[in-house]
Image (cartoon, helix red, strand yellow):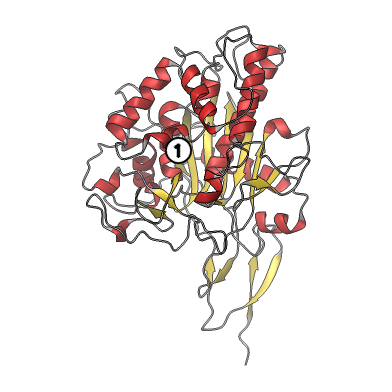
């Protein structure tokens, strides 16, 4: 006698009949979890709504990026305009990086080397900032204070990072802290979040503060995904290789790529800002960088591990009077339903980046992560969030603002680095040097120049 069919819901809400035998049990794509507060769920709901409405013109890519037949990791940067207006500024979808030889051959800076969701969302956010600068110049509504230059962010605006799954790397190391269940904060409003002080951070192992790299990609059968199986087999600096989370490796080992994990990159953004070196030269140093107020995560969320990953391990950087970003859990699921326990999680071979400034320019940009280039559009030889594309945006803004900046006639990796050095605000440079010298000593310096 055949066992009865059970019913699961797919991510669109429709029912799918699934036959489950004793040898084939369904594993939930996402476990149920408790939210930290209502605000975390509002952020997640706003992102998922935009994600499901994105115009994805390629059918195969759309099915993959919507989570049909594979899983996706979605990240976004969301703006809160007080008292109660949430706006999704950018979205990134992806879990893979380009092979090392492809990145090294990119002399014109047209490719995206890292297609993990958090990285794409941040690069899309930089395009959002340039669009806001253009609006400010045209005396249109903008996130920047009217008539003030260098640019200063309005006081009623904060930014929040959403991750459908905890960032790869340190945030996924389940050691040296007990994973406690979240307690829902009922005593605060829907557009507020708990701002509790983070507990004292004690170092028990180098891996607590170590920088990790994503494992190298290959041209065929890429395995470098957030939930991948790759583990560094080498021991370095007293770190047990079995403690290193899947899909990551220690810098300098055979499997390590030149791309830092998303936990390390989020920590960097929390410390010295989201805007990047070039755009930071348009902003007021005294007003400070554009920092994240919260990081909202779904799958794999663990408060103490998240706090360690994104801020607390940078002990020497944070001053006593500087608030840490809040780590929030959302109960809102990106994916419903399940898959066989015998099957491993399968992640999409596509990536996507979208920014709010593109809403009048057509669909989001779909990328092929193994090449770092778009698969559709008028220019498939250069991504809109590549180094050269972002440098072009800076060059146009610098010219419009009559800034005394020498812009290279054409892109080269060397000219790009020199341009960033020439415009690097002194305050940001000092913060960067502090991160390198005291907080992340094992992180090669060139990785701090890797992201525009």
Label total for image: 1
Whether 2 is drawn above or below 46: the answer is below
x and y percentages locating residue 122 in the rendered image: 55, 36
Left or right placement of residue 232 versus residue 3 in this view: left
Left or right placement of residue 282 versus residue 173 in this view: right
Secondary structure under the numbered disc 1 in the rendered image: helix
Whether 229 is drawn above or below 117: the answer is below
x and y percentages locating residue 164 in the rendered image: 54, 49
**Residue 5's quadrant in the figure?**
bottom right
Whether 280 is drawn above or below 435: the answer is above
Residue at left 33%, top 54%?
Answer: 174
Which residue is most to the bottom?
1
x and y percentages locating residue 343 in the rendered image: 53, 72
Left or right placement of residue 39 versus residue 359 in this view: left
Q: Mark 1: give few (<14), some (14-19) or many (20+) Cα within 10 Å.
A: many
**Residue 209's quadrant in the figure?**
top left
Which residue is most to the top?
147
- Residue 245 showing in the rendered view: yes
Q: Quadrant of the N terminus?
A: bottom right
Q: Residue at label 1?
A: 266
Residue at left 44%, top 12%?
Answer: 286
x and y percentages locating residue 83 in the rendered image: 58, 24
Residue at left 56%, top 49%?
Answer: 102
Q: Nearer the viewer, residue 67 or 294?
A: 67
């Amino acid at each position: 006698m055949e066992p009865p069919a059970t019913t699961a819901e797919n991510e669109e809400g429709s029912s799918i009949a699934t036959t489950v035998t004793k040898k084939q049990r369904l594993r939930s794509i996402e476990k149920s979890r408790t939210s930290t507060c209502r605000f975390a769920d509002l952020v997640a709901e706003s992102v998922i709504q935009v994600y499901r409405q994105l115009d994805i013109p390629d059918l195969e890519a759309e099915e993959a990026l919507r989570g049909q037949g594979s899983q996706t990791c979605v990240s976004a940067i969301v703006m809160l305009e007080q008292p109660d207006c949430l706006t999704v500024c950018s979205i990134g979808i992806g879990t893979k990086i380009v092979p090392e030889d492809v990145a090294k051959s990119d002399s014109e800076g047209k490719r995206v080397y890292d297609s993990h969701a958090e990285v794409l969302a941040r690069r899309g956010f930089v395009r959002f900032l340039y669009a806001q600068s253009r609006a400010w110049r045209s005396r249109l509504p903008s996130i920047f204070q009217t008539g003030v230059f260098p640019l200063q962010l309005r006081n009623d605006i904060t930014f929040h990072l959403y991750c459908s799954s905890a960032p790869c790397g340190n945030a996924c190391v389940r050691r040296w802290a007990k994973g406690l269940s979240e307690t829902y904060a009922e005593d605060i409003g829907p557009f507020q979040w708990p701002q509790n002080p983070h507990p004292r951070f004690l170092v028990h192992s180098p891996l607590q503060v170590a920088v990790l790299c994503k494992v190298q990609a290959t041209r065929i059968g890429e395995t470098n995904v957030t939930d991948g199986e790759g583990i560094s087999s080498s021991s370095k600096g007293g770190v047990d290789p079995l403690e290193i989370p899947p899909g990551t490796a220690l810098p300098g080992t055979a499997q390590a790529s030149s791309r830092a994990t998303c936990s390390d990159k989020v920590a960097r953004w929390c410390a010295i800002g989201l805007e990047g070196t070039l755009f930071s030269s348009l902003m007021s140093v005294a007003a400070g960088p554009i920092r994240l107020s919260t990081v909202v995560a779904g799958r794999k969320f663990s408060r103490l591990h998240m706090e360690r990953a994104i801020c607390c391990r940078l002990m020497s950087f944070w001053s006593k009077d500087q608030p840490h970003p809040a780590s929030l859990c959302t109960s809102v699921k990106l994916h419903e339903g399940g898959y066989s326990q015998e099957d491993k999680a399968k992640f999409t071979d596509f990536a996507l980046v979208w920014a709010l400034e593109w809403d009048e320019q057509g669909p989001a940009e779909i990328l092929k992560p193994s090449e770092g280039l778009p698969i559709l559009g008028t220019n498939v030889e250069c991504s809109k969030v590549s180094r050269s594309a972002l440098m072009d945006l800076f060059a146009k803004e610098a010219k419009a603002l009559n800034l005394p900046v020498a812009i290279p006639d054409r892109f080269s990796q060397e000219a790009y680095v020199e341009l960033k050095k020439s415009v690097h605000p002194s305050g940001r440079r000092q913060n960067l040097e502090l991160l390198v010298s005291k907080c992340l000593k094992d992180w090669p310096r060139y990785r701090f120049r890797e992201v525009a």
